[in-house]
């Protein structure tokens, strides 16, 4: 079982969390002006590196708060976490 450390609740089993995708993806400044292709790229295309990667997670079965973390996608090791309110 993979253990994930929630910044507020501490270490918990992975079944309490849901993956939220790549961290630090900025919302487009004017989505109404985007073409369908640009909007689709914003919604569906994300980096998928092998190695260290910044991700969003939510403690859905606990405090229900979102946070960013850095994880090695090869080993699943969580390297660090930092708090970010909201989504």
Image: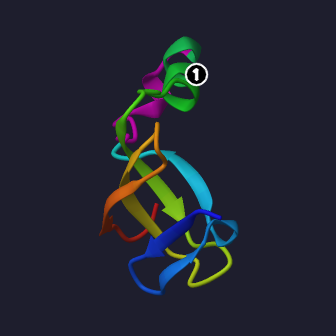
Looking at this view, is 40 or 52 the one in front?
52
Q: Position of residue 3 (x, y in %)?
A: 54, 69
Q: Secondary structure at mark 1?
A: helix
Tell me the residue at 38%/78% (across/down).
7
Looking at this view, is 24 or 5 the one in front?
5
Tell me where the magenta segment starts and ends, as one range: 25-35
Instruction: Look at the image and say whether residue 26 sits in the magenta stretch.
Output: yes
Q: Position of residue 68 (x, y in %)?
A: 38, 59
Residue 68 shown left or right of residue 48 in the figure: left
Instruction: Look at the image and say whether residue 23 sits in the magenta stretch.
Output: no
Residue 67 shown left or right of residue 1 in the figure: left
Circle 1 residue: 40
Q: Position of residue 15 (x, y in %)?
A: 70, 67
Disc 1: CA contacts within 10 A as few (<14), some (14-19) or many (>=20): few
Q: Quadrant of residue 8?
A: bottom left
Tell me the residue at 49%/48% (across/down).
76
Q: Position of residue 66 (x, y in %)?
A: 48, 68
Tell me the residue at 58%/77% (across/down).
64
Looking at this view, is 63 or 74 the one in front?
74
């Amino acid at each position: 079982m993979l253990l994930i450390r929630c910044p507020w609740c501490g270490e918990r089993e992975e079944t309490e969390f849901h993956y939220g995708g790549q961290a630090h993806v900025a919302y487009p400044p004017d989505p109404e002006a985007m073409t369908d292709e640009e909007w689709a790229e914003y919604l569906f295309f994300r980096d998928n590196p092998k190695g260290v990667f910044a991700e969003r997670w939510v403690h859905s079965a606990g405090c229900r708060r979102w946070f960013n973390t850095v994880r090695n996608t090869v080993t699943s090791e969580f390297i660090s976490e930092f708090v970010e309110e909201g989504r």
